[in-house]
Amino acid sequence: MDRRRFLALSGLCLTGVAGCTAENDQQQTTAVPTTSPEYDLDIEFSGLQSGVVELFEDAYELSSNPGSQYLFLNVSVTSGLRPAVEDIIFRFDGEAYSPKTEWDYPPLHRGEDSVGEFPDSVGDERYRSDDDRDGWLVFELPERGDASEAALSWPGGKWKPDESVRGRLANPLPDFSLEAWTVPETISSTARPEFEISARNEGAEPGQFWGAIDGDGWTTDRTVTLVTQRIPPGETESWRVTGRSSQIPPEDMSGENEEVTISYTLLWEGENQSQSTRVTYE
């Protein structure tokens, strides 16, 4: 055998061995298992409304979409990582809904079981995934539908509302009638105004009366307080709400012999109601 033939055969042999070795290496490679992040969340029902209060500069506005209901849920991270808002889904009537995140103006919310004191001009915190703040998320849902399998889900977890909430989701939201809206005739410049509201739930399901009180006139800030109250079906509830006093300027800004008045407006899902009160300086 000549030298060139021997070298050629040797080269083929080495190439074959290298190929076999590479193939064996590929067969022996195993994928490293990955684990999904663990999210431990505590979920609570916070409200079901026909719309949302938004903050337009220094005043309130009500926003709603005909044919929709707005489900508010409180989300708290009890341990582990904080899931992104877009990873939290609510399933209702066979469809999946993401939290509403696009607004014309910043949304505000006071839970129907809120224990926060009045005045409450900005409401509860909103849930954010980019910092450590727990709070509420809101889902815009059809005004009625099959709620038997309604549930909130996130990677590695699930929460199902109780029967009473599912019943409210499945049926149209109740109508309310405003029985009384009382504003004090006069208010001291250093006192907080106190209002009385009386409303009736005209529906067959529990419902949330919601809205806000806006102040206009000789004021420096129009956001007086948010309003919310859960009312059983067919019943009337009366309650008192305290507003902010910081909106009333001092006497030396009012001008001599000028009567200082403020017009308070109750914004709610019915026709807004306004009444004026006279400011007194002691």
Image (cartoon, rainbow, N blue to C red):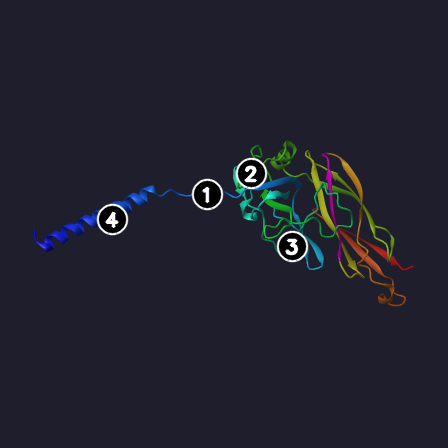
Front label number (3 vs 2): 2
Q: Earlier in the sequence, mark 3 or mark 2?
A: 3
Disc 2, SS: strand
- Give the residue pinned by disc 2: 157
Residue that appears at 87% across and 64% down = 251
| Pointer 2 local density, CA inside 10 Å: few below 14, some 14–19, many at least 20 | few
Q: Taking 161 as reference, is 281 left or right?
A: right
The amino acid marked with disc number 2 is Gly
Q: Earlier in the sequence, mark 2 or mark 1?
A: 1
Please state the extent of the stretch shown in magenta in the rendering.
222-233
- Give the residue pinned by disc 4: 18
Q: Earlier in the sequence, mark 2 or mark 4?
A: 4
The amino acid marked with disc number 4 is Ala
Q: Taking 20 as reference, is 251 left or right?
A: right
Front label number (3 vs 4): 4
C-alpha span from label 3 to label 4: 65 Å
Q: Earlier in the sequence, mark 1 or mark 3?
A: 1
C-alpha span from label 3 to label 2: 29 Å
The amino acid marked with disc number 3 is Pro
Task: Confirm whether the magenta stretch covers residue 44.
Answer: no
C-alpha span from label 2 to label 1: 18 Å
Residue that appears at 70% across and 44% down = 111
The answer to whether residue 37 shows anywhere in this view is yes
- Give the residue pinned by disc 1: 34
Q: x and y percent of residue 148 in the render?
A: 57, 32
Hey, which quadrant is residue 175 in on the image?
Answer: top right
Residue that appears at 10% across and 53% down = 5
| Pointer 4 local density, CA inside 10 Å: few below 14, some 14–19, many at least 20 | few
- Give the residue pinned by disc 3: 106
